[in-house]
C-alpha cells in the first residue's frame, strides 16, 4: 500500500537554524517522525516510529544521500510505511 497523499503534503518543523527539519505523520495507528539534517554534502535521515507512545523503531542513515528536505522526507515516509507493513504482517 502506498502512502496517503495527505502525508506527502505536510511539511516539517525547522530546527537547528534551518539545518534540521522534522516531519510528523501517522500511518495505521503509528506515529512517524522523519528527521532530516543538512550537512555540507546533502541531507541525512533519521526515523522514529511509535505505537501507543512506545518507540518501536529507531533508524539512522548518516550518509548525506538526499538533495533536500523533501527528498529525505519522502524516503523516510516510504521506509516507515514498509517497516510498519512488515510489522503488521508478521
Image: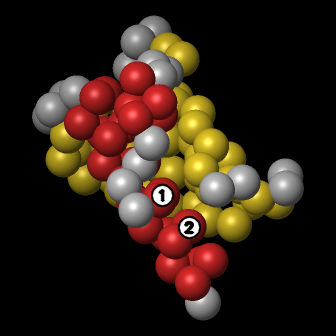
Q: Is residue 50 left or right of residue 84?
A: right
> Is residue 67 at all visible to an observer of this figure?
yes
Percent position of residue 14, x then y: 49, 14
Percent position of residue 72, x then y: 30, 39
- Classify 39 as above or below 49: above
23 or 67: nearer the viewer? 23
Q: Is residue 81 left or right of residue 71?
A: right
Residue 50: mark in rendering: none
Total count of labels? 2
Q: Could you tell me if the residues under marks 1 and 2 are in contact, i.e. CB atoms within 8 Å?
A: yes
Q: Secondary structure at mark 1?
A: helix
Percent position of residue 29, x then y: 72, 54
Residue 80: mark in rendering: 1
Q: Secondary structure at mark 2?
A: helix
Position of the C terminus, as image quadrant, is bottom right
Residue 84: mark in rendering: 2
> Is residue 16 at all visible to an observer of this figure?
no
- Classify 62 as above or below 19: below
Residue ID at (20%, 40%): 66
Amino acid at each position: 500500500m502506498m502512502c496517503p497523499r495527505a502525508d506527502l503534503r505536510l511539511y516539517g518543523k525547522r530546527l537547528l537554524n534551518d539545518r534540521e527539519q522534522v516531519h510528523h505523520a501517522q500511518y495505521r495507528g503509528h506515529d512517524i517522525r522523519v528527521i532530516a539534517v543538512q550537512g555540507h554534502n546533502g541531507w541525512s535521515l533519521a526515523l522514529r516510529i511509535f505505537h501507543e507512545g512506545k518507540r518501536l523503531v529507531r533508524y539512522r542513515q548518516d550518509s548525506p544521500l538526499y538533495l533536500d528536505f523533501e527528498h529525505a522526507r519522502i524516503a523516510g515516509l516510504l521506509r516507515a510505511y514498509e517497516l510498519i507493513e512488515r510489522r503488521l504482517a508478521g
